[in-house]
Amino acid sequence: QLQLVESGGGFVQPGGSLRLSCTASVFTLEYYPIGWFRQAPGKEREGVSCISSSGGSTNYAHSVKGRFTISRDNAKNTVYLQMNSLKPEDTAVYYCAAAMPTVQDMCVLVVDGMDYWGKGTLVSVSS
């Protein structure tokens, strides 16, 4: 079973940056579309960004567009989420998730569309 591990979370001031990483402990991520999701206290889990298996297709939530960038390095078996201009409302536990491989090079930013989940990493933005 695909096991995902997130890293890179932490505490940062508003306007700061963090880079999250998602990797798999045993299997290759190369064929899987990957998504980043987040869940703030008392709120539902929401999609942040996703990337297709080739990296050729990406999607972003409106709230992070222009500030966050998703990328992947299949040689390193890692997917990244570069987060710039962070705001207090970005505070949440961030999860990476993988969907089953498909023929189409695409990704969907839907919680119910993901098949494997990591345990999350906390991002806290505060002055």
Image (spheres, grey):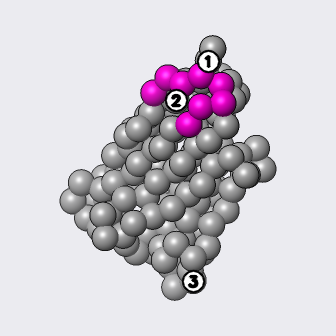
Q: Which residue is mark 1?
A: 126
Q: Which residue is mark 3?
A: 104
Q: CA distance from mark 1 to mark 2?
A: 10 Å
Please say if 6 is above or below 14: below
**Residue 11, horizontal then vertical, whole percent:** 49, 23
Q: Which residue is mark 2?
A: 123
Tell me which amino acid carries mark 3. Gln
Is 13 within the magenta? yes
State which quarter of the image contains the C terminus.
Answer: top right
Tell me which amino acid carries mark 1. Ser
Secondary structure type for disc 3: loop
> Range of the magenta residues?
10-17
SS majority, magenta: loop
In this view of the protein, can residue 72 be seen by the observer?
A: yes
Q: Which one is in front, 48 or 100?
A: 48
Q: CA distance from mark 3 to mark 1?
A: 40 Å
Q: Which one is in front, 106 or 127?
A: 127
Secondary structure type for disc 1: loop
Is 123 within the magenta? no
Labelled pair 2, 3 in contact (Cβ < 8 Å): no
Q: Residue at x 59, y 22 (%)?
A: 13
Labelled pair 3, 1 in contact (Cβ < 8 Å): no
**Residue 1, horizontal then vertical, whole percent:** 28, 59
Name the outermost residue toward the bottom.
Answer: 103
Tell me which amino acid carries mark 2. Val
Check residue 59 in the rendering and tell me which mark sits there, or answer none. none
Task: Name the N-terminal-most of marks 2 and 3.
Answer: 3
